[in-house]
Amino acid sequence: MLIKGRNSKLAPAIGLALCITALAQAGESPRHNAVVEAVSRVMPGVVNIITKTRVQRVRYYYDWWRDNWAPYAQELPPQESAGSGVVVDASGYVLTNVHVVKDAGEIWVKINDKNGEARIYQAEVIAGSLATDIALLKIIPEEPGETFAAATFASDDDLLLGETVLALGNPFGLGGSASRGILSSKSRRTETEGSKLDIPDWLQTDASINPGNSGGPLINLDGEIIGINVAVLKEGQGIGFAIPIKRVNESLSRIFTPEFLEGNWFGAAIRPGSNPLTVESVEPDSPAARAGMVAGDQIATINNHSPLNFIEFAKRLLNLGRKRAVKLQVKRKGELVACTVKLIPEKAYFNSGLIRDKTGATLEELTPKVAKALGYNSTNGLVVSQVDDDSPADKAGLTTGVVVVAVDGQEVNDIVRAARLLHDKVSGGRLMLDIVQVRRSGPFLRRATGRILLELP
């Protein structure tokens, strides 16, 4: 219909009225917009996290008869704190921040069931990374086979600067809440609680993120998680930050693995956000490599089951039993290839023998007894117990009794980690060791620190 003359000013109003009439006739309300749809899709999977931490106040009394100080502890009422999280797997796996659940004695989550009624469950920490502030919890179901509404991840780089985003969570412990804003930046750098986290590209938004929102999801209008809320800039108004889903996926790929949780070596890194799940890399000489897996393989089945996402894949890879064998079908160049991977304990391969083969030095973990004998007031690091003649360690001047505290700038406190850092070193490469040496001078102990460069054969 074409409207001319004086009545042309009425065209927008008439058009809006016609639109509303059409929606009403179709049984839809204009109130049911994209924001409402996205919130209703994700909110059932958003949980309120309540933690309880037992606090002990240590006091001292002086025992005159023993001439010694002895402590006793007075237990105080438990401290409670609140945060947020989001269910990412129907069996009850929940993503949140490490700082929300750190040092908690008890963890409880409140979630709305399928009927909209609030229910409270106990939860446990499965894994977490302080460096990335990402933790994975598991709800303990009250009934066998109980499932929960789970949110989905956006693609790693599916971010539009200026797009509408929604922050969901539990601000100030008030319960499920949603706030709207835009994606202000895709690559912001900042600090949280005085210490810089290992997250290179924060998401910045002006959607309200308040205390208690930490661990909740930042979502797009498709109802997909694009980040995990983590902080708000105190000095500014409407400046909040979230960990991007790409970094969340990277953290999951490290912490939700047989290596991290069970000490069993699988050897293939799976890209969590990929669909289908794709093998990102395969460690040389690993069980996965020996089974024929290569980077670029797409996971079709695991133990005859097609995994819907990384969490489901990882669950089936864990708790394999004594045989530690897993059957995989991978798609490679359009064809299905069968692989049977037999996991082995990491310490069966990454041990002091591998370190000695690479460097000529035998390292041992620093027990309190050995540390005391050395006059070393810490158990951090690995002690050199033997150096082979004419080896790279011998040529570099490494001697017995020296404590190695870092390899190529990475702290080492156990043999497996040190051996892993050496595993990928090629012939002719260099290795930097940070060392500590304690020497006795009369009644005094002198502590010296330094670095030694090894030339690997």
Image (cartoon, rainbow, N blue to C red):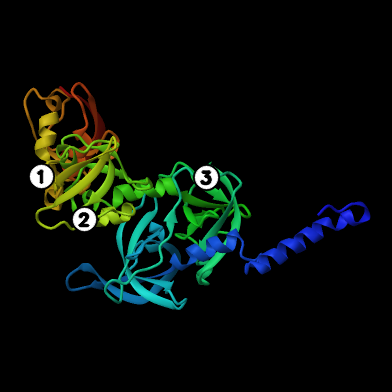
**Where does the N terminus fall, quadrant-wise?**
bottom right
Label 2 crowd (10 A; few <14 / some 14-19 / many >=20): some
Quick check: 166 above or below 436? below
Kindly indicate whether the residue at mark 3 contacts the one at mark 2 (C-beta within 8 angstroms): no
Q: Depth check: give the residue in front, 382 or 52.
A: 52
Give the spatial CA distance, label 2 vs label 1: 18 Å
Determine the secondary structure under disc 2: loop
Label 3 crowd (10 A; few <14 / some 14-19 / many >=20): some
Q: Earlier in the sequence, mark 1 or mark 3?
A: 3
- Tell me the amino acid under the disc marked 2: Leu
Q: Nearer the viewer, mark 1 or mark 3?
A: 3
Q: Which mark is residue 318?
A: 2
- Tell me the amino acid under the disc marked 3: Leu
Is any part of residue 373 visible from this angle? yes
> Circle 1 is placed at which residue position?
348
Instruction: Identify the residue at image location x=39%, y=76%.
Output: 120
Give the spatial CA distance, label 2 vs label 3: 32 Å
Give the spatial CA distance, label 1 vs label 3: 43 Å
Determine the secondary structure under disc 1: helix
User: Furthest residue to the left?
Assistant: 389
Q: Earlier in the sequence, mark 2 or mark 1?
A: 2
> Circle 3 is placed at which residue position?
159
Kindly indicate whether the residue at mark 3 contacts the one at mark 1 (C-beta within 8 angstroms): no
Q: Quadrant of residue 3?
A: bottom right
**Where does the C terminus fall, quadrant-wise?**
top left
In the picture, measured across the screen, residue 345 lies left or right of residue 71, that is left
Determine the secondary structure under disc 3: loop
In the picture, measured across the screen, residue 119 lies left or right of residue 255, that is right
x and y percent of residue 415 in the render?
Answer: 16, 43
- Tell me the amino acid under the disc marked 1: Ala
